[in-house]
């Protein structure tokens, strides 16, 4: 039986040195480092699994083990079990760790074939490290061919989920976390924004895994039942989900609307251009619950911003209870220093539920990178600086080191203006409840009831934590919301009152710790998951003469056929 080991790069991330810079461990916490990067105690937290590795593992004709965030010692222990293939996924930032892991594989599992994948494969230097295979596109088809299986077999979708809580609650296991399911519908995007690494990586087109809405729905339903009904909220990976309404969302939405066992919600990524073509209320009736919109700038020079007025779109989404992520970029060509606070004001006016402010990151392989290299504007930096908060572009209107502090100042400005993300999320749900509770559409009334349940569950968080909010204006807004929630949905139960007291004590303790103790890096723990082989019938195999054409790293174009 063929055995495959799939792994991320190794931890630790919070040890400054050869492989990491200060704060790298924070970047693994997707919410607190980016989408709710707030100076207070309300920041959300989630360590998102490496979904791509799990999708690979669930679709290979081999016994496969997935390692996430192993230490070097844990990785070596797996190598000593002599797997036949070792697959390593990495970003450009992890290039140094990739080199170390390939060397360790050659030492401890010399017969194993090394396969590398991920966005870091855009680096030409990867080939110099001596892997046996480099997957530069869709990995499932590629790995099936490497293992001698037909690339065109159906996809099996694994059960993958992520927990969400407040960052300060991470170490309090007695507090319940919210769990969302992760569904991989497809990768790649035809919008071809010049800065977008995912769009470039997949050849400016969509590479699909789940073909239609029924398959999306069945993936949700399977995870819902496996979790005994605890997972009914999902994040769908697809670069612009709304582009595929006819092919996927219409059928998915009808399945969700017709389901009387569960009330599913889904989140996704979408452009203003694509969303402008749809009836938002109908989408909400059929499960649409959260959307990430790349706003980029108040005067964004991208076609994906064509369509509706951005603020009007955000306002309608919020009125229907749809939470939002709005992201903007600092360091675009038209930016000057005095303009950046205005960009944050513009983002604040949209009142996104969560937000991202980042530096311009021209990843290798993008059109933007090519242009900036031609203009000699790419600064020479180490691989470990390849993240959203590092400056790698020389900008004529900014001094070196000026943009990153402006980003962090922008996050603080946003927090002072519109308060914590968790407040904005709950307030949006409550607004949706009020607007939909008396709807003539029964599916919208179901959404209203769903929102009401979420608001009631979140209520204890706000009952005794007002002193930790950023200013008097935000305190007044939160107090008004709490009073209205109690008037509409009833007073908190005795259990919720006790919970609010516990939360207040944790806030007080964490506030003192912040003031008195030096913060220590918080690293994710090792995660190990095993997958049984799939598709082992003779019909699943490809002819030997076809297999021999895929034998070395020079056959890289094979990865892009998916």
Image (tube, rainbow, N blue to C red):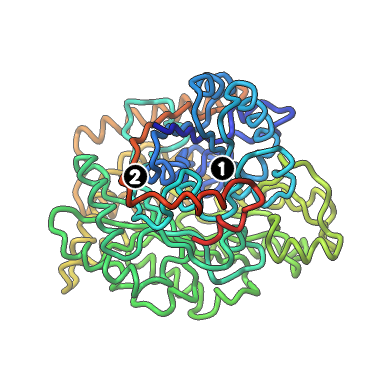
Pick out the residue farthest to the left. 260
Residue at x 62% of width, y 40% of height: 132
Percent x, y for residue 492? Answer: 22, 41
Q: Quadrant of residue 394?
A: bottom right
Mark whose residue sits in front, 2 or 1: 2
Give the residue number, with chain letter if any, for mark 2.
Answer: 158
* Side of 73 where 503 appears, left or right: left
Percent x, y for residue 267? Answer: 38, 57
Pick out the residue farthest to the front. 545
Q: CA distance from mark 2 to mark 1?
A: 27 Å
* Side of 428 where 388 appears, left or right: right
Q: Quadrant of the N terminus?
A: top left
The local secondary structure at tag 1 comes to helix
Between residues 43 and 479, which one lies in front from this camera angle? 43
Percent x, y for residue 18? Answer: 74, 29
Categorize mark 1 by other alpha carbons within 10 Å: few (<14), some (14-19), many (20+).
many
- Numbered tag placed on residue 33 in the rendering: 1
Residue 517 sits above or below residue 400 on the image: above
Q: Quadrant of residue 503?
A: top left
Between residues 204 and 449, which one lies in front from this camera angle? 204
Between residues 386 and 120, which one lies in front from this camera angle? 120
Residue at x 23% of width, y 51% of height: 221
Residue at x 54% of width, y 64% of height: 294
The local secondary structure at tag 2 comes to loop
Check whether the beta carbons of the residues at disc 2 and disc 1 lie within 8 A of each other: no
First in sequence: mark 2 vs mark 1: 1
Q: Does residue 123 appear anywhere in the picture?
A: yes
């Amino acid at each position: 039986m063929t055995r495959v080991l799939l792994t991320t790069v190794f931890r630790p991330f919070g040890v400054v040195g050869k492989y990491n810079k200060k704060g790298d461990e924070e970047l693994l916490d997707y919410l607190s480092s980016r989408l709710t990067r707030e100076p207070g105690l309300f920041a959300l937290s989630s360590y998102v699994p490496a979904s791509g590795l799990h999708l690979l593992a669930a679709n290979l004709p081999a016994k496969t083990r997935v390692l996430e965030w192993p230490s070097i010692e844990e990785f070596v222990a797996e190598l000593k079990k002599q797997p036949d293939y070792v697959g390593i996924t990495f970003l450009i930032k992890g290039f140094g760790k990739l080199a170390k892991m390939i060397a360790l594989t050659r030492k401890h599992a010399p017969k194993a074939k090394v396969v590398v994948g991920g966005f870091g494969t855009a680096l030409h230097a990867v080939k110099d490290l001596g892997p046996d295979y480099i997957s530069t596109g869709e990995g499932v088809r590629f790995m099936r061919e490497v293992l001698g299986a037909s690339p065109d077999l159906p996809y099996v979708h694994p059960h993958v989920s992520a927990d969400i809580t407040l960052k300060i609650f991470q170490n309090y296991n007695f507090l319940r976390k919210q769990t969302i399911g992760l569904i991989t519908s497809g990768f790649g995007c035809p919008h071809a924004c010049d800065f977008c690494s995912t769009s470039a990586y997949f050849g400016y087109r969509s590479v699909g895994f789940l073909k239609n809405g029924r398959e999306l729905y069945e993936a949700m339903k399977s995870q819902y039942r496996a979790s005994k009904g605890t997972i009914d909220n999902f994040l769908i990976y697809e670069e612009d989900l709304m582009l595929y309404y006819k092919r996927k969302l219409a059928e998915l939405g009808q399945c969700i609307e017709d389901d009387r066992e569960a009330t599913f919600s889904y989140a996704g990524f979408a452009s203003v251009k694509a969303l402008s073509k749809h009836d938002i209320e109908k989408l909400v009736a059929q499960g649409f619950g959260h959307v990430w919109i790349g706003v980029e700038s108040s005067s964004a020079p991208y076609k994906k911003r064509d369509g509706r007025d951005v603020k009007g779109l955000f306002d309608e989404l919020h009125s229907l209870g749809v939470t939002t992520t709005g992201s903007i970029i600092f360091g675009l060509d038209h930016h000057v220093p005095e303009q950046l606070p205005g960009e944050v004001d513009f983002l604040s006016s949209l009142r996104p539920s969560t937000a991202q402010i980042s530096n311009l990151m021209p990843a290798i392989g993008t059109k933007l990178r090519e242009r900036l290299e031609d203009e000699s504007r790419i600064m020479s930096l180490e691989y470990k600086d390849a993240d959203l908060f590092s400056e790698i572009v020389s900008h004529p209107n900014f001094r070196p080191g000026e943009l990153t502090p402006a980003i962090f100042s922008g996050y603080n400005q946003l927090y002072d203006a519109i308060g914590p993300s968790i407040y904005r999320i709950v307030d949006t749900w409550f607004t949706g409840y009020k607007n939909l509770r008396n709807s003539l559409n029964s599916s919208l009334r179901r959404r209203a009831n769903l929102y009401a349940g979420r608001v009631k569950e979140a209520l204890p968080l706000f009952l005794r934590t007002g002193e930790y909010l950023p200013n008097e204006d935000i305190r007044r807004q939160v107090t008004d919301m709490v009073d209205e929630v109690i008037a509409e949905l009833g007073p908190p139960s005795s259990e919720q009152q006790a919970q609010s007291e516990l939360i207040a004590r944790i806030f007080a303790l964490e506030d003192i710790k912040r003031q008195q103790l030096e913060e220590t890096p918080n690293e994710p723990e090792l995660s190990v998951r095993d997958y049984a082989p799939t598709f082992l019938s003779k019909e699943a195999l490809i002819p030997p003469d076809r297999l021999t054409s895929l034998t070395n790293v020079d056959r890289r174009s094979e990865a892009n056929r998916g």
